[in-house]
Amino acid sequence: MSEFEAYRGLFVAESRENHENLVKNLLIIEKGPNQDAIDEIFRSVHTLKGASASMGFADMERLCHAMEDIFQLIRSGSAEMSQDLEDLLLGCSDVLEHMIDDVEGGGDTSSLNPDEQVQALKKMLSELGGNSVKKEKTAPAAATPVADTSATSEDTGDLPLYDISITVATECMMKDVRAMIAIGNLEALGTITTINPSKEAIDEGKFDGSLTLRIASEAGEDALKTAALGTEIASVEIKPAEKQEKKSEDASSGKKPAAAGAPSPDKNREIKNLRVDITQLDHIMNLVEDLVINRGRLKQIAEQHHIKEMDEAIAMVDRSVSDLQNLMMIIRMIPLNHIFNRLPRVVRDVAQYDSKEVEFIMEGGETELDRSVMDGLNDPLLHLIRNAVNHGIESPETREAAGKPRKGLVRLVARRDRDNVIIELVDDGAGINVEKVKLKAVEKGLITQEAAETLTTDEAVELLFQPGFSTADKITDISGRGVGLDVVRRSIESLKGTIRVETTPGKGSRFELLLPPTMAIVDVMIVKINGKRLAIPISSIIEVANFKRDDSHHIGKGEAILLRDEVIQIFWLNDMVGASLVCEILIVVQYQKKKCCIPVDLVEGQQEVVVKPLSHFIGTTRGVSGVTILGDGDVVPVLDVNTMV
């Protein structure tokens, strides 16, 4: 692997963070002036510019440079944000995102020409009166040895100052890139006041491998040294620096100066977050799953052979594997903010496209889900958000006529409920027009007119989940493209989750997603039918009851039983495991509000198992979510109650 390719992944990861920060703060300043947000945007754009220049992505650097010029005016108070400028900057952020995608895919952004955006930014700059920006541009940056120490003295306050000398290894092929990465890491921990050579000189390749800088930071020497160190860094020397000017100011104001190098309260803070390639985590997870399987096998061998000497060792292994398994599950958990943070932009764009006014509120973004669940949740949530704004929220005029506020409300809430995560999407729009749904269903031939007249509200809402069903009157960029809620339901069910809809005409709708926090390791009940084992997820089981064949009743083509004053359909698994003459136990399972029961011969007990997906040779099988391997090596199907019911 070349030096360039080695840094590509790091560039993409850091650029995505800066891009996300850029978009988030652009949406903040759209609501009103916010100096902190403007400073964050300037920092993100400046970092993106420096990183792209170091990697040789000229087009990306050019676009960031033009955006930086605009924000220099806004930051200094010489210009204000407008709707046209906001739209232009968000459009530029989209181009930046495509460029980062291109780099991640192995490209160099040359296929994405930002000339149109750069020219529009320059035109906007001239309209805002930014002719002098070129002279002022480098003033606030911490990139030149000439100091903006007067400017940064206000920013750094009483923070400790450190002088750092960094030497890049002589064998490093891209010394300038390595230096820029070290600078970026240090900037995350404090404010660099002087630097030699300057960033511009390093960008232009005028770098001999030695770098000196002064930084104001409360992170402490250890943290700063760790941040500066890395692959191909030969040495890092750090020592406290004295604040000469600050001392004189303190003396004149009667304040007692702090001792040079005095430890700050957070001096011992260390870098506690590491970026790890997700494929490595997946590989570790597979190894943990193998340990879980073999833990069961060891327990079984010890029980069969009654080897007392092994009992203590197996107990230790059991405890260690359990701790490792729990730790691995925690590491794989990701806050929902990773998805939620992208959604305000979606709401804003759809509302603007439809000429609607929408307030979007998010809560519970800190709720965590397993990465495997998170990956499949992005598209369904995006679709539901678009539907809420496009179909749910009415136009301001319509809302005003109905006595509602002109601005609609869309609320996204996530919370943990026992062993599940619940995500609610609520809007105060028009609700689902049940009569329109029935009419569309009759037009499409899904139901007859007679059947439509007898449908309840819940049954009519259920029609929305039919393949290709849409109530949109015309095809637009937002809706009416034949991709409906059926895709959302399939995606949620593939995550072993459920979706439920409630609606009140004229008042709004509520979509509730019920998701398991993880899909990798689950609790199941092991049962036997006709001598063959099956695993049923504990989360789907309502109860276990005794069963006598004489108690069942034939209803049409099916069979049911009266259990606790409730008629429940019996679901025989003869096609899967063959017919059994015993079946004296009923396992009652539930999906949403629907129940059914499965007759079994024997319940072996509850067990924690690893669910492996079915091979692509087999394909998807209705009623089976995957397979698991028990301690004795037996391969057992895991039932998917959602698709069965």
Image (tube, helix red, strand yellow):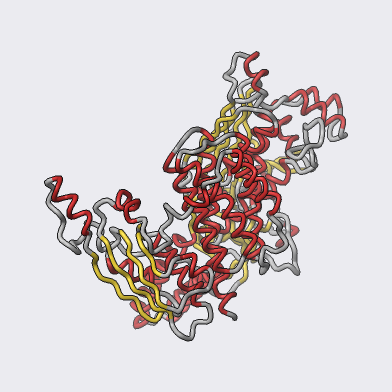
Q: Position of residue 160 (x, y in %)?
A: 25, 59
Instruction: State the quadrant of the N terminus.
Output: bottom right
Is residue 589 visible to us here?
Answer: yes
Is residue 299 rendered to the left or right of residue 240? right
Q: Position of residue 11 (x, y in %)?
A: 54, 65
Say above or below: 599 vs 85. Answer: below
Q: Position of residue 217 (x, y in %)?
A: 30, 59
Instruction: Name, please, the residue furthest toward the bottom.
Output: 171
Q: Position of residue 378 (x, y in %)?
A: 62, 50
Q: Considering depth in this image, is 281 or 205 the residue closer to the camera? A: 205
Is residue 598 visible to us here?
Answer: no
**Residue 533, picture quadrant:** bottom right
Q: How many marks?
A: 0
Q: Considering depth in this image, is 402 or 281 the residue closer to the camera? A: 402
Say above or below: 537 vs 296. Answer: above
Q: Image point 49% across, 61% down: which residue? A: 332
Q: Image point 79% across, 41% down: which residue? A: 481
Q: Considering depth in this image, is 386 or 509 the residue closer to the camera? A: 386
**Residue 392, picture quadrant:** top right
Q: Considering depth in this image, is 561 or 15 the residue closer to the camera? A: 15
